[in-house]
Image: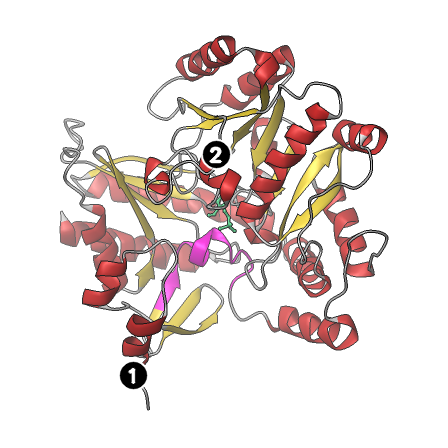
Amino acid sequence: MEDLFELDKKHFIHPTSSIIQQQTDGAKSIMAKGDGIYVTDTNNKEYIDAVSSLWNVNIGHGRTELAEVASEQMKKLAFSSAFSTFSHEPAIRLAKKISELTPQGLNAVFFTSGGSESNDSAVKLSRHYWKIQNKASKRKIISLKRGYHGVAAASTSITGIPEFWDMAGHLMNDFLHAETPYRSTTEKAIESLQSMIEQETADTIAAIFVEPVQGAGGVLIPPADYLEAVREICDFYNILFIADEVITGFGRTGTMFGMENWNVVPDAMTFAKGVTSGYIPMGGVVVSDHIHTVLKEKSKGTLFHGFTYSGHPTAAAVALKNIEIIEKESLVTNAKERGLELQNGFQKIKKESSIVGEVRAIGLIGAIELMQDSATGQPFTPDVGVTPAVINALHERGVISRGVTYDGSNILCFAPPLIITKQEVNELISRISDAILFVQ
Ligand code: PLP
């Protein structure tokens, strides 16, 4: 039998990975199967999937109901176009369902195959929205430093993590990045946003993109009044507020959508990941009734934006079943309740360890920040990254997690599947504690 590890090195260019490391160390695990919160590799080692793979397997692994619904839809009508005047039932029903779940006033959906395509679509839709109202100068997009929005043309440029610009630079013009409220205050972050708008002038700015919780940046939860302040700024300057709910959508933060935690309604939301729990690619943009009305009344001719797989019938059928499971099994409530237990567990670890600084969680997305010395609050120097050692120790103990290291911040991120039980949370906490105490 061919060696999968060798074939992997030879033929598979991994996404967002070090090619050098792949060539020298090879893949750490080749995953073979999944069940509930667990995944198992080809050596039969079982792991808790403590970040739901890529923050997306919300209903957990091995849900045959989704496979069955995909099979039924494929046999009936695997694919059909939604371009022009064609349509089909799964996409129509999913658009209606998502409209019912999103905050009041967001009722029309444009479908894509993932988060990057969703954010690119939202950039184009927001520029188009202004252009058809004779405000074509409103083209600039503001987002936040440390924000992650994907890797397509516009979404690479919205992303506020400079490493993602290394490969090809900003792929589109007119993208600006304001201060994040992380390790800061609402006042300072809003000041940065406002002075940017004043400097550029509001008649050049189309939209502000914000993740309710910055995920890939290191699970950065905004101060209580921050998102409301962004809403006020957008209203005052006549700028669209677009919430990137790619991670936070579909229950992750203990509410159906992340923005609900702050009672703030954006003008549009982008989503992906949790809409199908990763069982099949899908994403989209939900827009407000106002945007939809402007599009309907002022667009001339064809909207020249659409993917072959916008509203893919099989993906839509899987999404509908996935959402049915989230609702039937009360997974949003479970995320809230288990999230509190996760947070308590983090606090317990903080007490035991000399290198754990701030811990935080909202629903089932949380982080543990590591410091040189938590007693004095001394961070690591920017060139020291201790997270890879802890991530390794976790891997050895059967936990898949994710580390973020930058500017002295060493952050461990966790986002287990929303089906996790109390007992499984305890098991996860015990393994995390063990790994940190081993490394410190
Ligand atoms: N937006 C956010 C908040 C994300 O976390 C991600 C992916 O991690 C994306 C957008 C990009 O989504 P995709 O990788 O499906 O293109």
Determine the image quadrant of residue 106: top right
Callout 1 secondary element: loop
Pointer 2 local density, CA inside 10 Å: few below 14, some 14–19, many at least 20: many
Give coordinates of residue 366: x percent, y percent. 40, 42
Question: What residue sits 43% from the left and 34% below the top?
Answer: 147
Pointer 1 local density, CA inside 10 Å: few below 14, some 14–19, many at least 20: few
Range shown magenta: 47-60
Residue 50 is one of the magenta-drawn residues: yes
Residue 302 is one of the magenta-drawn residues: no
Q: Report the front residue among 113 and 355.
A: 113
Q: Report the front residue among 109 and 45.
A: 109
Location of the N terminus by quadrant is bottom left
The answer to whether residue 435 is left or right of residue 170 is: left
Q: Amino acid at mark 2?
A: Ile
Marks counted in the figure total: 2
Give coordinates of residue 137: x percent, y percent. 62, 19
The answer to whether residue 219 is left or right of residue 225 is: left
- Residue for badge 2: 158
Image mark for residue 3 = 1
